[in-house]
Amino acid sequence: MTINIQFYPLGEQAIVAKFDSELNENTYEQVCNFSRSLEQNPIIGTIETVPTFTTVTIYYDPFELVRAYQSKDNNINKSTQSSYNIILALIQDRIAKMKKNITIEHRTIKIPVCYEGDFAPDLEYVAMYNQLSTEEVIQNHSEGEYLVYMLGFAPGFPYMGGMSSKIATPRRSEPRVLVSAGSVGIAGEQTGIYSLDSPGGWQIIGRTPLTLFQPENESPTLLRAGDRIQFYSISIDEYTVLEEKQK
């Protein structure tokens, strides 16, 4: 697997692997491959692996890492004393052993969205900004397929790429103090879904009745990085029915 990757420390307990500076699906596929490899076969001493648009950050316990890898027979140079050099060597070894064509299974998840009334306070602005009708904005938004590049900002909030440039709209100049959970927004050429009630500056064009974050569940987030998302339009009545089923 020939990949030009840059590494750098993030404090004393994390290392960042940067796969490229350009955001595209090829780069993100490499990010997913590497991240899934670490999740399925973690390096002893690592705590968490966090994939983002072009990087993977690996958090680790430096003491556990040093104890584990200086006491066992492996390819790591025993004279290597720093935890950063050990984790760097282990990661480079892991990348060298990765197969060329690892197939990542992307889940495709359909998300119902009500683009009506109070659920879509910025829909008319997005339409006006792009010189489209509100119906054309809804059509553009609901007919695409989106890739979840990362979760962030709030637990379970998905940053999704792949939106049509026809409806790209800058963030609001003045963020709202409160955006309701489930609100579907646009910021630039990205779309996302607020997983919790929170402040926010994305242009809100609809709302889904689905719950994106349930901390009591074994898997607390509905979505994960690498998922492919398809939106479909529902009425307010359909929203109400689906919302009741979520309770």
Image: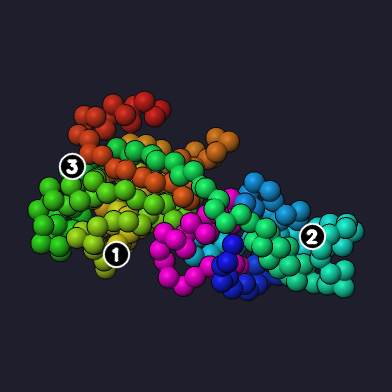
The Cα–Cα distance between marks 1 and 2, rounded to whole angstroms, is: 41 Å
Observer-nearest of 117 and 60: 60
| Span highlighted in magenta in the image | 16-36
Q: Quadrant of residue 96?
A: bottom right
Q: Amino acid at mark 3?
A: Glu
Disc 3 designates what residue? 116
Observer-nearest of 80 and 236: 80
Residue 149 in the figure: left or right of residue 231: right
Pinpoint residue 193: horizontal percent, then vertical percent: 36, 49
Task: Please tell me whether residue 34 belongs to the stretch shown in magenta.
Answer: yes
The Cα–Cα distance between marks 3 and 2, rounded to whole angstroms, is: 53 Å
Category of crowding for the residue at label 3, using alpha-carbon neighbours closer than 10 angstroms: few (below 14), some (14–19), many (at least 20):
some
Q: Which mark is residue 65?
A: 2
The Cα–Cα distance between marks 1 and 3, rounded to whole angstroms, is: 22 Å
Query: SS of the residue at dot 2?
Result: helix
Q: Which mark is residue 188?
A: 1
Quadrant housing the N terminus:
bottom right
Q: Amino acid at mark 2?
A: Leu
Pinpoint residue 238: horizontal percent, then vertical percent: 24, 29
